[in-house]
Amino acid sequence: MGRFSDFFIKELGRRQVWRFFLLATLVYVLPLILADYPYIDDNWRSLSAGMAWAEQGRLFTELFYNALTFNNAAPNIFPLPLLIASLAMASALTSLTFHYFRQPTITGCLVLLPLWYNPFFLQNLSYQYDGAAMALSVVAVIYAITFRHHRRSVQWLVPAFLIALALGLYQISLNVFLGLCCLELLRVANDRMPWPQWPALIGWKLAQVVLGWLIYSVTAYPFLGQNRALLLNWSAQPLLQLDVNILRVLEKVVLLFHGGFAWVFAGLLLCAIAGAVGLGMNIVQRKESAAKRLLIGLLCVLSVPALLLLVSGVALLFRDFNEGARTLMGFAVLLVLLFYLSHLALASVHERLPLLLLVPLLAMLSLSFAYGRVLTVQKTFATSALNSLDRDISSHQGLREAKRIYMSVTYSDHWLRGAAGSFKQMPVLHYLLNIDFYMLAENLPKVGITNVVSEKERRNATRVGYQHFLPLLETRYYRIYLIGDYGFIVFKEPAPIKSLRW
């Protein structure tokens, strides 16, 4: 028993740390692999082996799939990209662990694991195409933090190229890099790095960001569509727009803190506060002038609101603000902050106490498996919906031979009744799933129906203008009209899901 207990406090080698992270990363994505659900954009990409990342400013994602599939298209090869990303993340987290801890133990590994066990990152990983690229962008920024070389020119250029690579894979990963830079201030403060080295560290990181952006701007940015590069309208109360966007993000984040999760994170926050107090005492005891100690303390304090803003970060500045969970990559760094400070507090009491960090990690792992089950339920529902439409269209000659069938999408939070219980107990699951439609037109070619398109400019005509016609057929979820050579699928508004009683 003693030997088993010592395993959790003994120093680990690099290979042991890598094995731990490899196992941990693969366990976290296992539910997504088992669900094997093509998530939203995956449907049209898998049908056409489509790319279209370059016009989103993500040229390196396109090149990644070119290299991985050995052609100029992107056939679906899931889960290979996700497995590659998991291997890369295990190596990156290993590098970061040795960057934070000179003699890492299992508890040190636990501190960095939230960079992968970020609950909101589950939505990123849900994409069978984009998920791997988003994960690799995080890998790139981690290596930009940990890279070290004795030649100054190499030390400047390699991290800058890694930042540019991360931006070309997924721009939002910049939030993770900036967040890790904030954590660097806390780390060097705890390690009592002399004050003369602080300006150099801060200037060095700022220079890397600027140089990385310049490299990105001449490589992947020129391919970016203009409509995706529009920033906030600075002539129309930009601060109010920012305030609204921040409140929208806050509304989504609080969905995570429900039931037992609220208690777990409350305990984590208390431990982090204790760790922050200990770090503050460490700064006070430095053998430097009061002004320098005050300045160090101020930089550490300011890093906390900076990390809070970086939960959504650069996404807040765009006119077309996206509040989806996949943009909250910065929440992972906020979790690492809580884990790091908690580790400082718990380790100061007893060397085994930091093992308590397993509790919030197990909670997040549990959420991953719950989300995997929801994806499986969604896959069953989507298959049933596809079969229903296939049967109804194929059984009517007029619909089979129609020149075009317009599908009017009705958005609702109440389509997936099979996961109602999970949504009630874990509201964040519905936010992560982010599927509020019955069917996408891109799904129908899977069963050989190619004359259905999503309605755009004719939306109002379908919803209003054809109501006086009798539907050709009607089911629980939709009505289908046939007028001349054109068909129209109008989805019904589903009734709210009532509370479940057992």
Image (cartoon, helix red, strand yellow):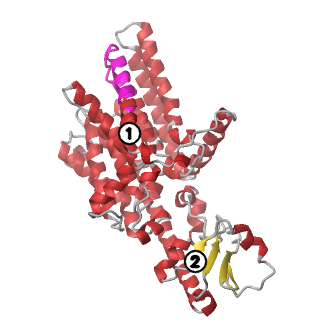
Q: Position of residue 104 (x, y in %)?
A: 25, 38
Q: How many marks?
A: 2
Q: Quadrant of residue 211?
A: top left
Looking at this view, is 451 or 85 the one in front? 451
Amino acid type at circle 1 is Val
Is the residue marked by circle 2 packed among few (<14), some (14-19), or many (20+) residues within 10 Å? many
Q: Position of residue 115 (x, y in %)?
A: 39, 45
- Image position of 467 with respect to 256: above or below: below
Magenta residue check for 206: yes
Amino acid type at circle 2 is Val
Main secondary-structure element of the magenta-colored stretch: helix
Is the residue marked by circle 1 packed among few (<14), some (14-19), or many (20+) residues within 10 Å? few
Q: Quadrant of residue 219?
A: top left
Identity of the residue furthest to the right in this view: 468
Residue that label 1 marks = 218
Q: Secondary structure at mark 2?
A: strand
Q: Is residue 363 visible?
A: no
Q: Quadrant of residue 75?
A: bottom left
Ranked by sequence position, the earlier of labels 2 and 1 is 1
Q: Position of residue 96 (x, y in %)?
A: 29, 38
Magenta-colored span: 186-209
Give me the residue at 60% from left, 93% from top.
397
Magenta residue check for 51: no
Going by the image, does 9 lie left or right of 455? left
Q: Secondary structure at mark 1?
A: helix
Residue that label 2 marks = 452
